[in-house]
Image: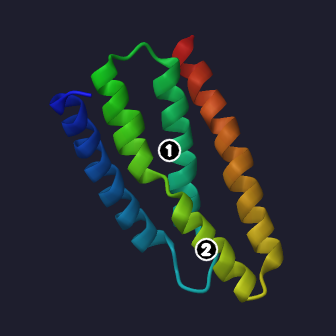
Amino acid sequence: MSLLDMMMIGLGGFLGAVTRYFISKKMNEIGRFPSGTLHVNLAGSLLIGFVFGSDLSRIWTLFLASGLAGALTTFSTLIKEIIELRRRRKGSQAILYVLITFGGGIILAVLGYYLSSN
């Protein structure tokens, strides 16, 4: 991995993390369904599918997929929010959150791939 590769991942990661922070801050409310995290995870899935379906250079793939989408999406926050929903006795919301995140993420990644590869 070259220095340029690392810089592109870092720049994409910075932009993805900052974007996730602002979206989560704006959309997630304590005690409510974590819609901000859901949106960034689904958007990141679509972006990753789109990138891997495209004929982008290595640098753009690293920037968009590893950097931007990698930092935009967040598995650790997803798990924390599932645990919080369960603690607040909102088990059905926790199950719905898991199903939408993983099912929707797979569907959107496939959709992004097919949209960009045609």
Residue 72 percent coordinates (x, y): 42, 52
Q: Amino acid at mark 2?
A: Glu
What is the secondary structure assignment of the residue under circle 1?
helix
Q: Amino acid at mark 1?
A: Gly
Q: Is residue 34 above or below residue 64?
A: below
Residue named by callout 1? 44
Q: Residue at the left extreme?
A: 3
Q: Give residue 108's mark.
A: none
Residue 5 percent coordinates (x, y): 24, 30
What is the secondary structure assignment of the residue under circle 2?
helix
Q: Residue at the front extreme?
A: 1
Q: Nearer the viewer, residue 117 or 68?
A: 68
Tell me, what colour scheme is on the image?
rainbow
| Image quadrant containing the C terminus | top right
Left or right relative to 34: residue 66: left
Kindly report the distance in space between the C-alpha atoms of the residues bearing marks 2 and 1. Answer: 18 Å
Residue named by callout 2? 81
Left or right relative to 78: residue 48: left
Badge 1 density bin: few <14, some 14–19, many ≥20, Cα 10 Å: many
Residue 10 percent coordinates (x, y): 25, 45
| Image quadrant containing the N terminus | top left
Residue in the image at 52% along x and 80% along y: 29
Labels 2 & 1 near each other (Cβ < 8 A): no
